[in-house]
Image (tube, rainbow, N blue to C red):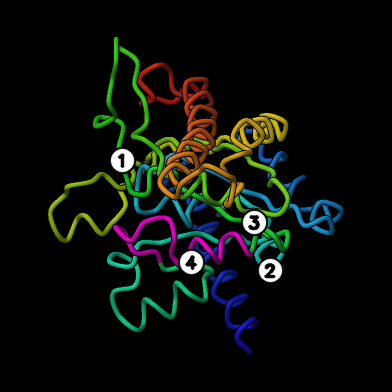
Amino acid sequence: MAELLSTATITATGLLCKAFLNSGLCSITVSNLHILLDALRNDERRRHGQGVVTVANHISTLDDPLAWGTLPMELFLNSNTTRWSLGASEIMFTNPLFSAFFRKGQVLETFRGNGIFQPSVDIAIKQLNEGHWVHLFGEGKVNQPPNYPRTNGVARLPRFKWGVGRILMETAVPPLIIPMWLTGFDKLMPEHRSSPYKYFPRLGIQLGVAFGDPISVEEIAAALSAHSHAGERFAPGWDAMERKRQMDVMRSDLTAIIQRAVEALGRQVSGSLLDNSRS
């Protein structure tokens, strides 16, 4: 029964998003969707316990689920091809109705400030070990392009959270990691509008969803190998503080690899300031 309710919630939400994207109230361009579809439809990958991770910039409160309105409808009906994601407790799980809706929609309640060792991250790792798909917003919150930090005229995303690195470190098989880049969603739902306008999307906006090539599994494996001694919990001569420091370095390095890939895709799509679509 619980699985049926989850499928119904995801399907209804997906259809609503598809209806909005096809309504003429906005327009959308999707690039390289086949990269994600090929990964999700790869049964051999799943049988070997390799999960799929998508990682995107986070520019509005509607990024997820609206971006998934670009997917074929049959994906909503199969738990193997629907995403799991992490959502902030203080924003999405604010009352029993919202909590039930988001849980059935495969959103894992995450408590900001509680660090990378919490149940939502544990469950995300478990889902990946079972071959499922987990979507991550590396920044951990909405950041719109005018607020991106800049150095010498080049914008960067705010630093990704180390939970990304922990997830990659602790999966049994390195997951297939697909960078994504979203455009226009920040104009659809600009931050800091007054109530009630902040709850309604603006119309006539050009949206974009771009998928990049999967990050090389070899690059992830090399980063893990470079710090492999950090995982030797009882290595002679290593005290607890030094082990923790090495593990932190490994998580930081892995997270940085993912952030660089997302930013590189962003520069291809939106230029050096990461703030406009070239599509």
Residue closest to the eye, 53 or 255: 255
Q: Disc 1 designates what residue? A: 143
Earlier residue among tags 4 and 2: 2
Give the x, y percent position of residue 173: 73, 50
Give the x, y percent position of residue 255: 49, 38
Q: Quadrant of the N terminus?
A: bottom right
The residue lying at 61 percent from left, 39 percent from top is 229
The residue lying at 56 percent from left, 61 percent from top is 124
Vertical relation: 145 (above or below) 77: above
Tell me whether the residue at label 3 lies in contact with that at label 4, contact meaning CB atoms closer than 8 angstroms: no
Q: Residues within 10 Å of mark 3 (few under 14, many from 20)?
A: many
Dot 1 falls on a residue whose secondary structure is loop
Q: Disc 2 designates what residue? A: 79
Among the 4 quarters of the image, the one containing residue 78: bottom right
Q: Residues within 10 Å of mark 2 (few under 14, many from 20)?
A: some
Magenta residues, start to end: 110-126
Q: Disc 4 designates what residue? A: 107
Earlier residue among tags 2 and 1: 2
Earlier residue among tags 3 and 2: 2
Vertical relation: 15 (above or below) 25: below
